[in-house]
Amino acid sequence: MISLQHVSKRYGSSLAVDDLSLEIERGEFCCLIGPSGCGKSTTLRVINRLVEPSSGTILVHGHDVRLARPEVLRRSMGYVIQSVGLFPHMTVQENIGVVPRLLNWDKARIRRRAWELLELLALPPDEYAGKYPWQLSGGEAQRVGVARALAANPDILLMDEPFGALDPVTREHLQTELARLQQELRKTIVFVTHDIEEAVRLASRMALMREGRLVQHDTPEELLAHPADSFARSFVGADRGLKRLSRLFVRDFIQPAPAVGLNDSPERANSLFRIDRRLPSLWVTGNGGKLLGWMNRPENGNPEHPIESLVPVDLRSFPLAPDLTLKQALSTFIRFGVETLPVIDQQGRLLGQLSLPILLEA
Ligand SMILES: Nc1ncnc2c1ncn2[C@@H]1O[C@H](COP(=O)(O)OP(=O)(O)OP(=O)(O)O)[C@@H](O)[C@H]1O
């Protein structure tokens, strides 16, 4: 899909990119990663000819990019940068419509597309289409930037530190959105970041660079498990086991959860405690299997009624959602100081539980 062959870029006497060869397959999410100044942005920009390489060849869909007119090439790829670059005098809808207008789409089609994309990016069109960039938060502006890049439905998205300027919470939110979007759209994405956590979370393959050269091009799992050299090892960090947890999801580690209904008899709870003598507590569910809290094993062994022994939980923060990463789950374990956490679906129904030993084994 995108093939960089022996690409170099020289600025005066220094080489920003040094004989770099890289193959990016269709539908891949390739993160270019490495320390500041290693040539990530330059590598990205030679793909849409914002930067002309000093030597080497770049093929997109098998065609040499040098043979395409730069403006045509750029329109055929989405491009998202850190500072967004929305036009301040244009509304959100007009900003999203920039490339479609250049492509002479009619007004109705541009509007339809803008609304469709705003919905896709969780920005209600009624509310956002008519806003100006100064009326948006950083996270919202970045979403509009992504919508604008997707406007003409390009196969390729080039993203240069798109979330670099956002606060950590918004950043994590947008990472989740982008991962969801990619599941749905399957674009070929080249994404520059110097944040290894971000790359591990999003990439299907990571290209680790150092001083303009490619050090390792691998899946995040491989890069974390088998860094190619001492530089790669130090870049991925001593806590690479912890980082791997960002690639694993709660849904794949759910186990059955021992539970009673709120209106079940004390005998029912008692029999579950008898079956597993080490069980410290039972989850308690209400209508339709919705989680309410837990009940502890009675200390004197006398059966207790779930209604009377219920310890309610804060459903917004305590239970896990199946699509959280194990890393996020670990922080919930630490926050509450527990060994087992319930997993619930969007309706609050108990799906099962995750235990800390299972997570640590993963
Ligand atoms: N237009 C330019 N003129 C001169 N030198 C440049 C130019 N653009 C980049 N460089 C140099 O090329 C090298 C690679 O820059 P590049 O921006 O590609 O790195 P990067 O890995 O994206 O860095 P960062 O993570 O800090 O953005 C740097 O040493 C930089 O100073």
Image (tube, rainbow, N blue to C red):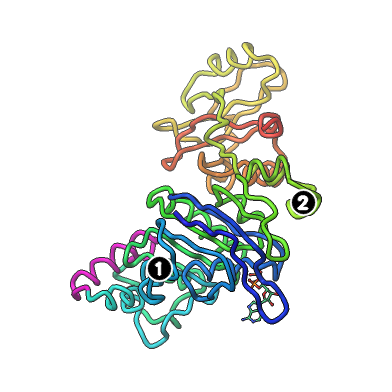
Residue 248 location, quadrant: top right
Magenta includes 178?
A: no
- The spot of residue 313 in percent (x, y) is 58, 41
Three-letter amino acid code at disc 1?
Answer: Ala
Left/right placement of residue 317 relative to residue 188 reads right
Stretch in magenta = 105-124
At 59% from the left edge and 57% from the top edge, which residue is drawn? 21
Numbered tag placed on residue 99 in the rendering: none
The answer to whether mark 2 is within 8 Å of ligand 1 is no
Along the line of sight, which residue is nearer the eye, 288 or 94?
A: 94
Q: Is residue 166 visible?
A: no
Q: Which residue is mark 2?
A: 237
Tell me which label, 1 or 2, sits earlier in the chain: 1
33 is higher (above) or lower (below) than 353: below
Along the line of sight, which residue is nearer the eye, 147 or 311?
A: 147
The answer to whether mark 1 is within 8 Å of ligand 1 is no
At 41% from the left edge and 41% from the top edge, which residue is drawn? 347
Three-letter amino acid code at disc 2?
Answer: Gly
Q: Marks 1/2: CA distance?
A: 33 Å
Q: Which residue is mark 1?
A: 149
350 is higher (above) or lower (below) than 176: above
